[in-house]
Image (cartoon, grey):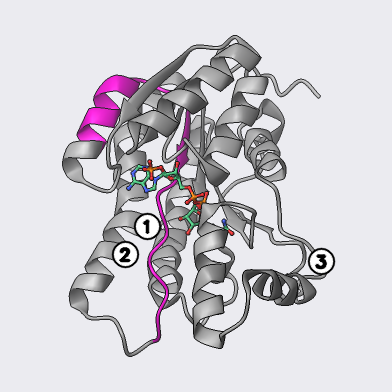
Amino acid sequence: MDLGIKGKRALVCAGSKGLGRGCAEALAAAGVDLVLNARGVEALEATAAVIRQAHAVQVVTIAADITTEAGRAAVLAVAGDVDILVTNAGGPPPGMWSDWDRDDFIRALDANMLTPIALMKALLPGMIAKGWGRVVNITSQSVKAPVAQLGLSNSARAGLTGYVAGTSRQVAPHGVVINNLLPGIHDTDRAVSLDTGVTQAEGITMEEARRRRMASIPARRYGSIEEFGATCAFLCSQQAGFIVGQNILLDGGATNVTM
Ligand code: NAP
């Protein structure tokens, strides 16, 4: 399917690996030029080189911590006016409800709620002026149903979801659509770190931790970054212009809800 976005320009945050990289690759495959961000220069440059080679699009890189004000300023200065924004950052650490203090919450809110909000505030006016724009926020299945050990994520992402629910309806009249993608478990470094936590907590091997997790998912497997990226690219397409303010689960059926 032609997504109708060839020649558009996208900022993909936290995109050198994992889900962000999947989104960057799928957008590039649709002919979108990229501004690609992550903190580590090596993986960022390697990913950018692979994407340029595979898809013959422009990829500008900016190594910065997107969760800091200075990092965002550097990224936004390089990005300038973009048509598409994919927000993403690392997820908060796991733990139990009694583990976290105020500073832990502030860090989680900064990374997973206030950073995407700041990016939208900076870039939505340009999209509105052009009468076209797409925003995809990578959040989590924890928005639909809490993940017990990810209380910081449950909290911060719920806040972002509320903001998007209201904001998406205010910018939709201008041809700008905002949606959230809610990953369940995907085969990335984040999954390795979550599963490592399970091996330590339960005294089991990595293989057993993965086997148990897969058994709990109707699709009986982890998601791939290619599947995730393809869904993101579709949400950025011309065809997705009537999908407004939605929270789309990509979890292999793991979240046991009717709607
Ligand atoms: P990942 O494989 O660990 O990749 C994270 C990417 O983000 C890397 O490119 C990393 O590069 C970059 N990054 C991390 N922190 C950053 C920061 N502060 N500023 C700029 N770039 C940053 O993680 P993932 O699995 O793709 O997860 C992406 C998001 O989805 C996370 O918020 C995670 O909690 C959420 N999620 C993931 C899953 C899953 O199963 N994978 C499920 C639910 C939710 P550098 O380290 O070089 O910066």
- The x, y position of residue 237, in whole percent, is 66, 29
User: Cβ of disc 3 within 8 Å of ligand 1?
Assistant: no
Badge 3: residue crowd in 10 Å (few <14, some 14–19, many ≥20): some
Quadrant containing the N terminus in the rendered view: top right
Residue 97 or residue 49, whichever sits in front: 49
Q: Is residue 108 above or below residue 94?
A: above
Percent across and percent down for residue 250 are: 69, 56
Q: Is residue 94 left or right of residue 7?
A: left
Which is in the foreground here, disc 3 or disc 2? 3
- Residue 99 image point, x, y percent: 31, 85
**Residue 220 tag number:** 3
Q: Does dot 1 land on a helix, a strand or a loop?
A: helix
Q: Earlier in the sequence, mark 3 or mark 2?
A: 2
Callout 3: helix, strand or loop?
Answer: loop
Q: Residues within 10 Å of mark 2 (few under 14, many from 20)?
A: many
Q: Which residue is mark 2?
A: 108
Q: Please state which amino acid type lies under the numbered disc 3.
A: Arg
Q: Magenta region: which residues? A: 72-96
> Mark 2 touching mark 1, by CB under 8 A?
yes
Q: Residue at x 32, y 26 (%)?
A: 62
Which residue is rendered at x = 38% and y = 87% of the image?
Answer: 97
Front-most of residues 84 and 215: 215
